[in-house]
Image: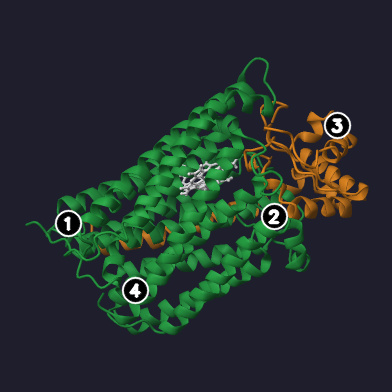
Amino acid sequence: MKYQSQSVAKLYFIAAIALFAAQILFGLIMGLQYVVGDFLFPEIPFNVARMVHTNTLIVWMLMAFMGAGYYMIPEETETELFAPWLANLMFWIFLAAAGATVAGYLLVPYATLADLTMNELLPTMGREFLEQPTITKIGIVIVALSFLFNIGMTILKGRKTVVNLVFLLGMVGLAVFFLFAFYNPVNVVLDKFFWWWVVHLWVEGVWELILGAILAFVLIKTTGVDREVIEKWLYIIIAMSLITGIIGTGHHFFWIGTPEYWQWWGSIFSAMEPIPFFMMTVFAFNMVNKRRREHPNKVAILWALGTAVMAFLGAGVWGFLHTLSPVNYYTHGTQITAAHGHMAFYGAYVMINLTIISYAMPLLRGRNAANPPKSQILEMWSFWLMTISMVFITLFLTGAGILQVYLQRIAESPQSFMAVQDQIALFYWLREGAGLVFLIGLIVYISSFFVGQSDPEAVAAD
Amino acid sequence: MAEAFTKSMARNIFYGGSAFFFLLFLALTFDSLGQLPNRDNRAALEGELGPVIAQGKTLWEVNNCVGCHTLLGEGAYFAPELGNVYKRFGNSTDAIKGFILSRPKDGIPGRRSMPQFNFNDEELTALAEFLKYVSEINTAGWPPNIQG
Ligand code: HEM
Ligand code: HEM
Ligand SMILES: [Fe+2]
């Protein structure tokens, strides 16, 4: 750690990991409810567990992105953060808002929460991923604006690099597109159309800028490859992301009442969306192969390479699988969607956040470059446990999805949704088993922060 | 990458390409908005039942129905698609109301069950009218069959 103010990142990273744990716990609850339907009913109905699972996911992604910003920007700009106190204050506000929101989900019926938070004044609740009370959404906007102000001012007074510019652009986009969460017309088609401006233009648009910038930063630091080379790659990757991903939004406009030409626009452009993810894989491996130094933080490099591979598999391959409209006609809104959602979110955004945490945490905790070998080895175990179990979760859901599509939508005498669910229960049991292994991986991950603390840190072996 | 391809070329492709495709996306959006009146069943919203449907949508939201069900294929995959439930239930709002009303308070042993929301008759009507309105949106022939 070169700049004192980078230390605020630590709070964000710790909270992110805590929320990650909550996310997985509720994932497992839901996974069990899939096969033991009355588990925790009516105390924690499925929809409540789902809100906790997906909202903690989103909030910990935001927390970790901000932590990444507070860590990277001072180093990139070569100056202290503009207002460290503001970053600190915003952290506590964000954490309190997130905690209160989750408590609200769990303690009172959702309709009561809507009442208590006066949803009727500006109704925004009750839409997938955007379930937060309006007041929480406003809180998110305030936190995001303060973040932008803080890092924006830091960049203004310091060195301008491509990494901090692209990161800033990504975070501005994140804030701007989130504003569509406040638009909620009665007209269901319009509601859905602009809902995707938040969801799709985040994960297949501006978040890819954030992902690219963090990946570039970690690769610059750990491989010592010339910044010019890495920055050129970064530009071309994010160019492909937006060129394909913006019109690619059309893959969500096939069956929601929008004009049918979207079947062409959406299919063609989204079919090209795997390109930037593929380039990311080539990029990461190339840079590591051309490395000019042996960085002692081996596990951070493992996470970086893992991100590149898994993002391509989850977003690129599993996305392509169901993105052409004639295929999507059958797979839309099934377990195939869930399979893709899991591997894409994990491979791209969970893993990039764990990459920057893995790189930065040892430094934030006062080490020179890396954790002791014992701790790194444990973290590598957690990498493989979580990543492989996520591959299996995806494969089991894909199996469930193929059967579901066939039995419910293709077979000669299509069966009802509930009848089909009973027949594919085996796959849900297997998914839950893989989920338990994921949890073990997460426990190993968290414990890697506590082992070998008094050992000497790893040194490069060259 | 080849030396002839410089960083500033890459940067220009990024800014130029993104701006171009964003503008194209806006143009397509405006065109879509113009075509929606022929597809999105807004006549129902502008008709006599408009306020009832709006109340139905509010109830749909504040009870987080989409946390278990899909609506036009979007939402959760734990419970059946409801975009076409009006048709699946024989074009009957009464059948929808009856179903919601009859959910057991304590669930069904060992099985997935919908919560009992204790809606009154006016609320049940609003929800059923909302689902009827959604079922009449032109969705380009989706879902493939009545099972949703
Ligand atoms: C990291 C990037 C990505 C993430 C995090 C992601 C995540 C998701 C999630 C969570 C959903 C479900 C949304 C819902 O609940 O309705 C979804 C849907 C979808 N995604 Fe992605 N995705 C990514 C990239 C891609 C790419 C590159 C493609 C295409 C090549 C793609 C194609 C699709 C399609 C077609 C759907 C709609 C599925 C349906 O009709 O039910 N995604 N994605
Ligand atoms: C122990 C592991 C996990 C289990 C058992 C699990 C289970 C589930 C279940 C049952 C759902 C709801 C599906 C439905 O709507 O019917 C869900 C949704 C979701 N989960 Fe997980 N989950 C796990 C881990 C994760 C991880 C690590 C991530 C992110 C990286 C994640 C991201 C998501 C997303 C984005 C959705 C919404 C998907 C969509 O709308 O298509 N989950 N999860
Ligand atoms: Fe998408």
Q: Residue at x 55, y 75 (%)?
A: A93
**Which chain shows up in green?**
A
Q: Is mark 3 within 8 Å of ligand 1?
A: no
State the image quarter where residue B79 is shown: top right
Numbered label attached to residue B91: 3
Query: Alpha-carbon distance for marks 4 and 1?
Result: 29 Å
Label 4 and label 2 in one chain: yes
Residue A151 lies left or right of residue A380; in this view the side is: right
How many angstroms separate mark 3 from mark 2 (CA)?
Answer: 26 Å
- Which numbered disc, 1 or 3, marks the residue closer to the eye? 3
Q: Nearer the viewer, mark 3 or mark 2?
A: 2
Q: Residues within 10 Å of mark 2 (few under 14, many from 20)?
A: many
- x 46%, y 75%: residue: A148
Q: Numbered disc 2: what chain? A: A
- Chain hosting mark 4: A
Q: Quadrant of residue B75?
A: top right
- Quadrant for the N terminus of chain A, please: bottom left
Q: Are marks 1 and 3 in contact (CB under 8 Å)?
A: no
Q: Are marks 4 and 1 in contact (CB under 8 Å)?
A: no
Task: Specify the subunit that label 3 lies on.
Answer: B
| Colour in which chain B is drawn | orange
Is mark 4 in CB contact (under 8 Å) with mark 3? no
Residue under numbered circle 4? A73
